Image: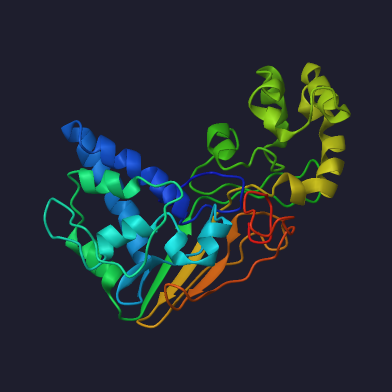
């Protein structure tokens, strides 16, 4: 399962700190209206905060820091845990100032948080949500711990032996016809789905709608070719499409949110977290593949910079040396 699935243009959105906040704010709002809806919102928050607890390291005087591998990760998130958008929430839930009552008390912290998005802690404090004690104890436990998680479902993106080769069988009773699932994973250009994607786009004129952001332009040769397929269907062009796919499949699938297997090892003194063997050799961005969290200001990670920003302080240029 995935607890915070933002679905951005990156590899995996496992344990995404920005989208964890996107999930938390509306859930705390809806938790306050309607008994059944409140119960469901509490369940979502419990699962979300359990995931945060499993990937939080107590550092620098018991300040809780989120230190997990995750997708949808930006420069501000990677350079220091205190700059992550989850800091406000984890400080309230797992810090020294948490009150065991329906109300959440102010939290003591050794760091000054300067929110980029902001407001998530206000939603949490203003709500009636009560964090289960066991989740807080998991976050604050300092004994050695291993957390293994599988997030998402797998989709084959590597080219098959030939254009007519059968597509791999899917697990969990899934079907390649479930376009709403696969498109939600940004897998619309994976080979088993590519003909269906082209046919559906032509049927519903998506090239001038949702697929406009692909950057094909309004009169490019590529767009004219794709629209021209509409009269006969993509199956008639499968051989040509396959030749194109053989060359460009790493680019086509750079944003696929494929299945991710994460491994986190936490001790009293450090925490190591990684996503294992995730799309090796493929390009992508906004990936935080692994991190060693030593303190609130000392972390270790590696990245392969796609480009260097002209202005080293301009993190809005994407991709850059960290994103």
Residue 184 place in picture, x, y as percent: 55, 38
Give whichever of 156, 8 is nearer the camera.
8
Give whichever of 129, 105 is nearer the camera.
105
Residue 170 place in picture, x, y as percent: 57, 47
Q: Is residue 202 visible?
A: yes
Query: Where on the picture, by quarter, is residue 215?
Result: top right
Residue positioned 48% across, 69% down in the render:
263
Residue positioned 30% across, 50% down in the render:
121
- Total labels: the figure holds 0
Residue 238 place in picture, x, y as percent: 81, 34
Give whichever of 80, 133 is nearer the camera.
80
Q: Is residue 196 visible?
A: no
Residue positioned 74% across, 59% down in the render:
308
Residue positioned 84% across, 22% down in the render:
219
Left or right, 214 with reference to 258: right
| Image vertical order of residue 41 relative to residue 137, above or below | above
């Amino acid at each position: 399962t995935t607890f915070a699935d933002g679905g951005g243009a990156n590899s995996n959105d496992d344990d995404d700190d920005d989208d964890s906040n996107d999930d938390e704010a509306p859930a705390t709002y809806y938790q306050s209206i309607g008994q059944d809806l409140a119960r469901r919102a509490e369940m979502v928050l419990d699962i979300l905060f359990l995931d945060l607890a499993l990937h939080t390291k107590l550092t620098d005087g018991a300040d809780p820091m989120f230190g997990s591998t995750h997708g949808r990760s930006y420069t501000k998130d990677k350079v220091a845990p205190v700059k992550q958008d989850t800091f406000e929430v984890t400080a309230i839930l797992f810090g020294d100032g948490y009150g065991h009552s329906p109300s959440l008390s102010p939290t003591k912290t050794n760091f000054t948080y300067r929110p980029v998005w902001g407001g998530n802690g206000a939603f949490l404090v203003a709500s009636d949500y009560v964090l289960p004690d066991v989740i807080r104890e998991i976050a604050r436990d300092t004994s050695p711990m291993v957390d293994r998680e599988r997030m998402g479902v797998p989709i084959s993106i590597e080219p098959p032996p030939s254009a007519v080769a059968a597509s791999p069988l899917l697990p969990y009773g899934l079907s390649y016809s479930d376009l709403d699932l696969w498109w939600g994973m940004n897998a619309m250009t994976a080979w088993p789905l590519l003909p269906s994607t082209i046919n559906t786009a032509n049927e519903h004129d998506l090239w001038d709608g949702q697929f406009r952001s692909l950057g094909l332009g309004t009169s490019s040769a590529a767009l004219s070719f794709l629209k021209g397929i509409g009269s006969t269907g993509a199956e008639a062009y499968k051989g040509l499409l396959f030749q194109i796919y053989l060359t460009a499949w790493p680019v086509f699938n750079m944003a696929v949110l494929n299945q991710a297997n994460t491994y986190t090892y936490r001790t009293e003194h450090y925490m190591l977290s990684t996503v294992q063997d995730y799309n090796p050799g493929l390009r992508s961005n906004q990936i935080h593949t692994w991190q060693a969290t030593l303190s609130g200001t000392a972390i270790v990670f590696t990245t392969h910079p796609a480009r260097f920003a002209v202005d080293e302080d301009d993190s809005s240029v994407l991709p850059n040396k960290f994103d």
